[in-house]
Image: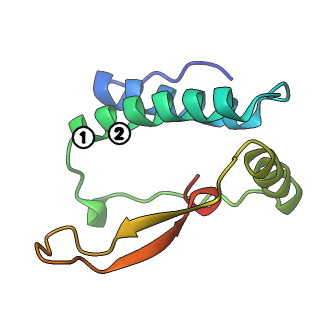
Amino acid sequence: MEELNFSDPVADSFLNRVGEFCRDIERPDWNNAHAFIEAIHKILVRLYSYGLELSLVDLTKWYADILELEENVRNIALQKIQRNTPSQYYWTALNQLEFDVPSTGTGDLIDVL
């Protein structure tokens, strides 16, 4: 995938990290679930960091096409994520601002990725 270039260097960096995330998910040679999770964790931290720096955009003035992945492409990516995710479910606090005993729920790591 080629590097994307935009006039906004933060948006440019963000979109290139998105491409890096997709390439990591699609890598055919993951043979160690721990290495996969570690790599995805690092890229997601960078992705969130760049995302926090993005300028706010008035979405009423923008039009964007919706990108639909072909079903077979999506299924292959999901299979790679499932094969390399040692634990699919995790506990999460539903309301992190509850100070007594917060309500908890279950998250799905494969769905999130």
Q: Amino acid at mark 2?
A: Tyr
Q: Is residue 15 shown to the viewer in this render? A: yes
Q: In the picture, which quadrant includes the N terminus?
A: top right
10 Å neighbourhood of mark 2: few (<14), some, or many (≥20)? few
Q: Is residue 104 above or below residue 45?
A: below
Q: Residue at x 76, y 52 (%)?
A: 82
The residue where tag 2 is placed is: 48
Is 31 displayed left or right of 19 in the figure?
right
Outermost right residue: 72
Alpha carbon separation for disc pair 1 and 2: 6 Å
Is 100 displayed left or right of 59 in the figure?
left
Residue 25 x %, y %: 69, 37
13 or 44: nearer the viewer: 44
Q: Is residue 8 shown to the viewer in this render? A: no
On the image, which quarter does residue 60 sit in?
bottom left
Label 2 secondary element? helix
Q: Is residue 10 above or below residue 113?
A: above
96 or 12: nearer the viewer: 96
Quick check: marks 1 and 2 in contact, CB under 8 Å? yes
Q: Residue at x 31, y 21 (%)?
A: 9
13 or 92: nearer the viewer: 92
Which mark is drawn over residue 101? none
10 Å neighbourhood of mark 1: few (<14), some, or many (≥20)? few
The residue where tag 1 is placed is: 52
Is 46 displayed left or right of 38 in the figure?
left
Is 47 displayed left or right of 102 in the figure?
right
Q: Amino acid at mark 1?
A: Leu
Label 1 secondary element? helix
